[in-house]
Image: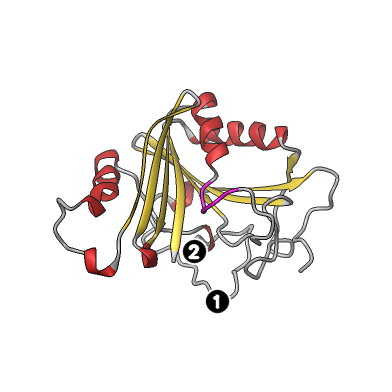
Amino acid sequence: MGFGHLYVNADRDRVVEAIVRHLGEKGFLQFPMTPELHPKRMKETHEGLMRLYWISPRQGKWTGIFEFRYYANDERERWGYADEHLGVALSKAAGEVWRLEVLDGAGFWLYAHYVDGAEQEGKAYQDTPADRTTDRTHPRYELNHIIEREGFLNVGIGYEHIPGAPVAKIESVAQSAEGIEGLEGFVHLAFDKAARSPGPAPV
């Protein structure tokens, strides 16, 4: 399984405000999610119609953004689980941003560091099972070192794992509060494309 996160050097409320503004410019309206409206199956909604997030409280420097991972992939503009365009926009509106992407089964990761609307540094890496090692000086551990240095929390937790009143359980994905740092301070955000009734897209 893989994951993708954005971490923003800003207070949670400023991050939320910037997300609302950015998606509003793309024609999305924020709306109050309910378990009845929430997707309950993988690929039940398309990211061009609905966008779903959990936003952590600021922990140390960083506010974490955990986006729904299971949008339908047809006609998908972006690659991966974290929204590069949102990361760039947040770096202009709120504070520096790190984007992390991991596909652990494929031995792949990437990171990008955005400051003032531009990528300051970034790297992608992939290895094969034959390359894998526990030697932490090996290049495959570079992303681990960044995570440890920056103090990012809740790395590897997907949107679907995070329990909360506004959401519904996704198929067979387990939800648990165990191991989620700051869960009581998380807020849920749901956005729907303007001029469309809120709710999952038909399958």
**Place of residue 134 in the rendered image (x, y in percent of width and height, measured from the top left):** 16, 62
Residues at circles 2 and 1 in contact by the CB criterion of under 8 Å: no
Q: Residue at x 14, y 50 (%)?
A: 137
Element type at mark 1: loop
- What's the magenta region? 78-82
Closest to the observer, 194 or 103: 103
Q: Residue furthest bottom?
A: 172
Q: Which quadrant of the structure image shows residue 170?
A: bottom right
Amino acid type shown at disc 2: His
Please rate how many residues cluster around mark 1, counting C-alpha atoms within 10 Å: few if below 14, some from 14 to 19, many from 20.
few
Its colouring scheme is secondary structure
Q: Quadrant of the N terminus?
A: bottom left
Amino acid type shown at disc 1: Ser
Element type at mark 2: helix
Q: Residue at x 37, y 53 (%)?
A: 109
Q: What is the count of numbered marks?
A: 2
Asked if residue 68 is positioned above or below residue 98 in the image, the reply reads: below
Q: Quadrant of the C terminus?
A: bottom right
Asked if residue 66 is positioned above or below residue 24 in the image, the reply reads: below
**Place of residue 157 in the rendered image (x, y in percent of width and height, measured from the top left):** 43, 58
Residue 172 has which mark? 1
**Place of residue 144 in the rendered image (x, y in percent of width and height, measured from the top left):** 27, 50
Main SS of the magenta part reads loop
Residue at label 2?
Answer: 161
Magenta stretch holds residue 80:
yes
